[in-house]
Amino acid sequence: MLKRFWGCLLCLLTSHGTATYCQGLKPGLPGMAPSRWITIRNTQAPGRSYASTTTPATTYTQEDFYFKMWLPVLIRPKFGIIIGPHYRTEQLELKREGGNNPAHQLSNWTLRAMGVDLKASVKVDSTSWLLFSAQVNQSGTLRSDLPGSIPLNYTLTSVYLRRKSARKEVGVGLMVNKSYNLSVLPVFIYNYNFSDRTGIEMSLPHRIAARYNATSRDIFYVKSEAVTRTYYVTCPDKTEPETFRRVEVDLGVAYNRQLTRMLGVELFAGYRRNLSLTLPEGVIPVRTSGPAMSFEIYLRPPVGVSRKLK
């Protein structure tokens, strides 16, 4: 039973996997980054600056910590469902002696996001899949005395994906998101391997990446990836939560290294460009773009176990 658990989980997660023995169940091209079972990531974005109506501009570092774990719900030869509970904590770390936050609107922010993702895959035939995902979370100053005042955010996505050849996959679909407002966007997926070492991965409107496989364990990316955060925050002298929302894009270079069969790391360094910013009343943006870097450590389900299930 334990071997079946690990093997089915790895196969369902391998939408970006290199394991060809799983490609009959789940899409993905050879050379793509390995699937994640457990993810732990820390991100630093220094040099952001905010002021208030009563205080001068002050420099902060946006720092967040993220954890996610995938668990199987239902696994069948042509159908699978997994869920992924996740948790994020974010803070604006003040870069100033004394440690007191001069902008009182920011002083009570304890930014948290918690929720669950669900993914389902339906195998239509040997080269086609229907992919569904649902994401639900609650984000803001999540204090025990304010749970009812923080609304739920959700995203629903449906994609039809077809493997055109051993080197190419194409998918189209639709995404519905409700957070700050309701939006409906088209989804386009295009994965193509130019050679055994190089390829391009597109998942619009979220991500574009050029990939270089230096070795079977080392992958370099030049990528652009969207970053959206929506928090409902409590401010002094306010009875209702206000909105702190950022829409940004990360541009930079990432390095993925598989240390062992189960353990891997990914490093990213680049520039985070702010595209849109919504702040509570009285908070004034001064510098909203700048450098960004992240360190991620992840675990994969045991590969050797799933090979035994082949």
Image (tube, rainbow, N blue to C red):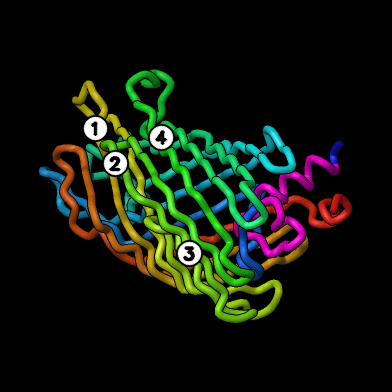
Which of the marked residues, 2 or 1, is nearer the chain's N terminus?
2
Q: Amino acid under label 1?
A: Glu
Q: Nearer the viewer, mark 4 or mark 2?
A: 2
Query: What distance separates the C-alpha of mark 4 from that of mark 1?
Result: 19 Å
Residue beneath disc 1: 242
Residue 190 is labelled as 3
Regarding mark 4 in the picture, which secondary structure is present there? strand
Q: Earlier in the sequence, mark 4 or mark 1?
A: 4
Q: Is residue 261 left or right of residue 57?
A: right
Residue extent of the magenta highlight: 3-25
Looking at the rendered structure, the kind of residue marked 4 is Tyr
Q: Which residue is mark 2?
A: 183
Find the distance from the CA under tag 1 to the CA under tag 3.
38 Å
Give the quadrant of residue 81. top right
Give the structural element (helix, strand or loop) at label 2: strand
Q: Position of residue 36 (x, y in %)?
A: 64, 53
